[in-house]
Image: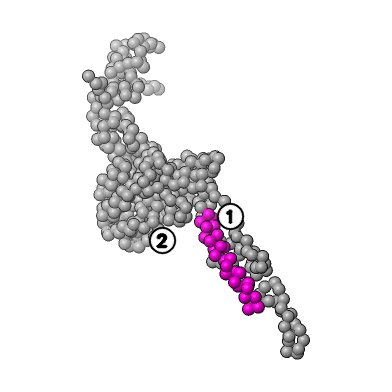
Amino acid sequence: MSEQQSRACDPQLIDSTTRLVEFLRDLASARRVPVRDIRSHAQVLWLVDLPDTLVPQRSAELGDVLLSVDHVRSVPPPSPPGELDGWLKPEQLVNPDIDAPDLSDSGPGRVEETGEDGEPRWRQETQQDRPDMVEIYAKWLPKWQAWAEEERVRLRQQRWHRELYSISTQLGQIDDEWELVLATGLLTWTAPGGIRVRNHLIATRLHLRVDPDTERIDVLLGETAPALQDRELLADLDGFTPHRTDRLRQRVREGDAVGLQPSLADLLESWCDRGLEAEARYLPEWAPRETPSTTAEVRPAPALVLRKRDHGSLISYYDQMISTLTGPDAQTPLGLAQLVAPLEPAERMLFLRDQGIVSAQALGQDPLFPLPANPEQRTIMTRLRTDNGVVVQGPPVINGT
């Protein structure tokens, strides 16, 4: 006969406990000022700005690598033919952001010509004097333009690497104050009363891993489920119906909208149908919308966001509780389970046994009392052998407890 198990892994009990913690978290959130403009965060890196060489993994699961950024070096431009010396500006040759280095109207050479008075005069040579220079330039230019296009991509990858390296350093020093998240579902909306909202609905914790040898940076999705943070953004605004998104919040906890998976679009479309009393449109665009309007709009617009942790309230602690209640190994702690479900003493002891805590073993067979014990005190010890807690009531005392 198999050994009886506790209800710590019961999905219904886990769900009820999670709802309780979320409710307490919402109460704490009501005391803080919501961040409704994404520009208020320390740093925002839009994935739409990634160069073609960096492709995020849309199928990444929790704990997987979402994006990898290698350290690349710049490549010098192709040297122009020697005949073009003096015809090109050196500062333009190394600038990949321009369309092409200009071929000067005049070159370094001098041309003799006869003036109106019949005397010889010298002037600088021009393109009309040297059509061969124009031809040489035209043959060399495609090589430079190919280099410039590749160098622009390298520079963009360098900027991403530099930004992520800086974030990794910052998180390594003050990880308890800052966090990096993948933000998806950008909501842009001007609510009744003129309050503007431009921030994401979903946030997933990220971790950065830097290879010390190659300096390759991996961006990994965290191990915990994403969070639907519409209540934090909108709870105090007219036109938001938080109870209608409870099911969506549960879906996110259960694994929907992880990273950039296809389920993200479905969840955002569902939010547009439920989240606001007014019309909300969903657009499958990665580029962010800049200006909110009275018509709410939601688009994926994924971004890596470096933001401050909220230590001004209990929110961060509730977040940690919610994290322990999500994922494949989630279990309900006994202290929380007792708040949402009636548990008999035998059930409570099963929780303790599964956690490796058994009261009888902790007390021993014959506990030593520092002072003489009466029958009531011994009854308390006996009851603690079969339960995790006993209520003791006694008369009031002076200068004591």
Q: Is residue 278 left or right of residue 185?
A: left
Q: Which residue is mark 2?
A: 290
Q: Depth-wise, is mark 1 or mark 2 nearer the camera?
A: 1
Q: Which residue is mark 1?
A: 75
Residue occupying image coordinates x 51% and y 52%:
157
Residue 132 magenta: yes
Q: Quadrant of the N terminus?
A: top left
Residue occupying image coordinates x 36% and y 58%:
285
Q: x, y (%) of residue 74? A: 57, 54
Please, is residue 63 above or below residue 304 in the view? above
Residue occupying image coordinates x 72% and y 76%:
110
Q: x, y (%) of residue 199? A: 39, 54
Q: How is the image coloured?
A: one colour
Q: Residue 106 or 138: which is nearer the viewer?
A: 138
In this rendering, does residue 319 appear at all?
no
Residue occupying image coordinates x 39% and y 60%:
289
Q: Main secondary structure of the magenta part?
A: helix
Q: Is residue 321 left or right of residue 162?
A: left
Picture quarter containing residue 117?
bottom right
Tag count in the figure?
2
Which element carries disc 1, helix, strand or loop?
loop
Instruction: Tell me which label, 1 or 2, sits earlier in the chain.
Output: 1
Q: x, y (%) of residue 252? A: 31, 44
Q: Residue 138 or 356: which is nearer the viewer?
A: 138
Q: x, y (%) of residue 56? A: 42, 49
Which element carries disc 2, helix, strand or loop?
loop
Give the magenta-colored segment's residue range.
128-155
